[in-house]
Image (spheres, rainbow, N blue to C red):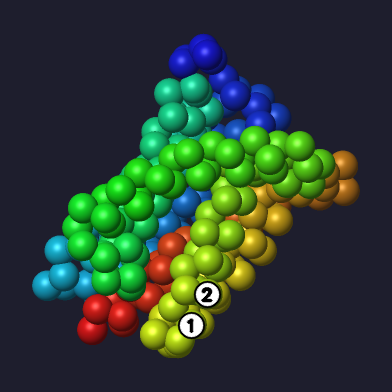
Amino acid sequence: MDWTGTIDGYCERTDPAFWSEPVNAATNLAFLVAAIVMWARTRGMPAGQTLSALLFLIGVGSGLFHTLATGWAALADVAAIVLFTLAYLYLANRDFMGWPIWISGLGTLAFLPYSLVLTRAFETLPFFAISSFYWPLPLLILAYSALLLRSSPVTSRNLAVGAGILCVSLAARSVDELFCAAFPLGTHFVWHLLNAIMLGWMIETWRRHRS
C-alpha cells in the first residue's frame, strides 16, 4: 500500500486537495463533541474516560483521513476505531457479562477471528461489501443484547438501540457513491453524525449499567 498516495474513496472528494471533502471533514467535529460530553459524564470512572478519549481519537483520525486522504491517515482512522471496539468489548465482557478479567480478555481477542470470518462473508454481498469490515459490529452488539435480555433488560434495550443506529449509519456509508450523480455531496457525512451519536450512546449505556 502507498502510505502517502491520495485515496479517492468518497463521493464528495473530486481532487487531492486538503479541503476537497469539507463536509466529510467538518462533521468529524461530532465525534469530538460526543467525546467531550462523555468525558464529563464519566468523571470519576477511568474506564469511561478511556472510552471517551478513544472516541476523541476516532474524530482526529477520521479528520486526518478526510483532509489528507493518504494511506497512513486511513490507517490512523481505522486504528482508532479498532482500539475503541476492543476496549468496549473488554468492558462489556467484564461489566455486562460479569466475566473474570482473564475470560474478558480472551473474549476480546476472540473478536479478531470473528471479525475476519464475517468480514469475508459480507464481502460477497453486493450492498454490504463496501462496509464489510464494519457489519460484524451491529451483529455482535445484538448478540450481547440478546444475552442480557433477562439479566439486565435496560442494558439489553440500550445496546439494541445502539445496534439500530449503527445499522442506519452503515447504510448511509454504503450508498455514498451510489448517489454521486444525483447528490454530489454523497452520504458519508451521515455516517459520521450517526456514528458519533451511536458511540456516545454506547459509552452512556456502559455508564448507566455501571452506575
Image vertical order of residue 138 relative to residue 26, above or below: below
> Label 2 sits on what residue type?
Ala
Task: For the residues labelled 1 and 2, say whether their Cβ atoms are less than 8 Å apart.
Answer: yes
> Label 1 sits on what residue type?
Leu
* Point 23% across, 84% down: residue: 211
* Point 44% across, 29% down: residue: 75
Q: Nearer the viewer, residue 57 or 79?
A: 79
* Point 47% across, 68% down: residue: 144
* Point 44% across, 40% down: residue: 112
Image vertical order of residue 91 relative to residue 149, above or below: above
Q: Judge from the rendering whether residue 211 lies leftward or rightward of residue 57; answer left or right.
A: left
Image vertical order of residue 4 relative to residue 118, above or below: above
Residue 34: give x, y in percent of width and height. Answer: 38, 65
Q: Which residue is mark 1?
A: 149
Q: Which residue is mark 2?
A: 146
Residue 91: give x, y in percent of width and height. Answer: 29, 62
Structural crowding at the residue carrying mark 2, measured as other residues with C-alpha within 10 Å and reported as few (<14), some (14–19) or many (≥20): some
